[in-house]
Image (cartoon, grey):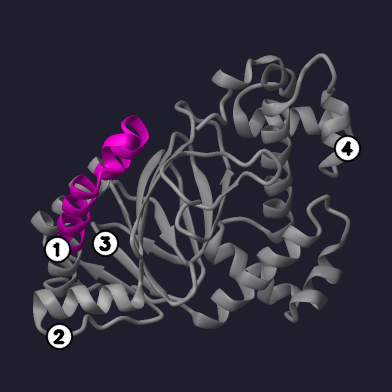
Amino acid sequence: MAGSGNTADAEAKSVDSVAAHIDLVQTAPGGAATCVRTVVFAGIRLAEIDLGAPHIVFLSPPKDSVVFIFSFTSLPGSVWNGAAVRHDTVLMSSGSSLHLRTSAARRWGIVAIARPVLAGHARALLGTELETSEASFLRPPPVALGDIRRVLGQACRLGAAKPRLLARRGVARALEQDLVRALICGLEAATACTGLSVNRRHVGNMVRFERALAKHSRGDTSLPALCREIGVSARTLQNCCDAFLGCSPIAYASLRRLNRARTLLAMADPAEASVAAIAAHCGFKQPGRFALTYRNVFGERPSQTLSRPPATSADSA
């Protein structure tokens, strides 16, 4: 994304909000709509994601950048790359794709910084470069994490409500400096989270799994074929999905297609589209079973999603 504001992708429900790919997969009914706000500075991209229901989020970070992810809430029930997080924690990742899973509504903050930009700011503030790793969990002091949350939230809300004001160089520069200062100083004082680790081999397996599912978005392949394409056994893939997603590979593939169907229903013209046709397009061959599963996940019938005006649909950002 080249600017700031809200965005939704009708075909794949993916958002390019930090110069990367983000998939949002709702897993259970919820209240408020999903909302993504993004802001772009020079070499820095921010995203604030409000999820009003349990979701699985898949993020492919931009190349040659370091990504920081944190929750705006301190509630338990979040799993990041297979590690259960129960405290105010920042996940720092350099080049690794990420899976986030939550059992309740969550508000996420994401900061992606180009390596040279991060190094330059760190040298200016600390006199040295900030150590980065492929994936690590850090716990900043509460005050520092509060500052990071405050500045990121302020920037993203300003970008959504008053993009012209944020486009002013002085305003953008001030927010950028405040955020970078809070982030670097907070991480420099952070402690490593003991007992939390990321299995790099599993991360690689899950990235290949996501790519295979994107390639077969209509469910036109079997689990054995997926395993051969990924290069893992069925048991290995099951173990990875249990840890990262909390469900089986087939269940997750179905959830992805179900979310895709919901987005298409929300964007379609009810005078021209039908639930059965969209369900079939997404690989669901039994309309009755599709409608039942849809209602169990989203809390409404697919016909309700189709008939709702797009501006107020559950997927409007």
* CA distance separating discs 2 and 1: 14 Å
Residue at image mark 4:
280
Residue at (53, 53) in percent of width and height? 16
**Nearest to the observer: residue 12 or residue 283:** 12
Residue 164 lies in the magenta stretch: yes
* CA distance separating discs 2 and 4: 56 Å
The answer to whether residue 243 of the structure is visible from this angle is yes
Residue at (68, 48) in percent of width and height? 256
Judged by depth in the image, the label closer to the viewer, 2 or 4, is 2
Residue 171 lies in the magenta stretch: yes
What number is the disc on residue 128? Answer: 2
Q: Say left or right for 35 vs 181.
A: right
Residue type at numbered disc 2:
Thr
Residue type at numbered disc 1:
Arg
**Nearest to the observer: residue 243 or residue 208:** 208
Q: Say left or right for 168 vs 163.
A: left
The answer to which of marks 2 and 4 sits earlier in the sequence is 2
At numbered mark 2, what does the secondary structure look like: helix, strand or loop? loop
Q: Say left or right for 123 vs 285.
A: left
Secondary structure that dominates the magenta span: helix
Which stretch did the figure color magenta? Answer: 155-182
Up-down: is 1 above or below 262?
below
What number is the disc on residue 89? Answer: 3
Mark 4 surroundings within 10 Å by alpha-carbon count, few (fewer than 14), some (14 through 19), many (20 or more): some
Mark 3 surroundings within 10 Å by alpha-carbon count, few (fewer than 14), some (14 through 19), many (20 or more): many
Up-down: is 115 above or below 4?
below
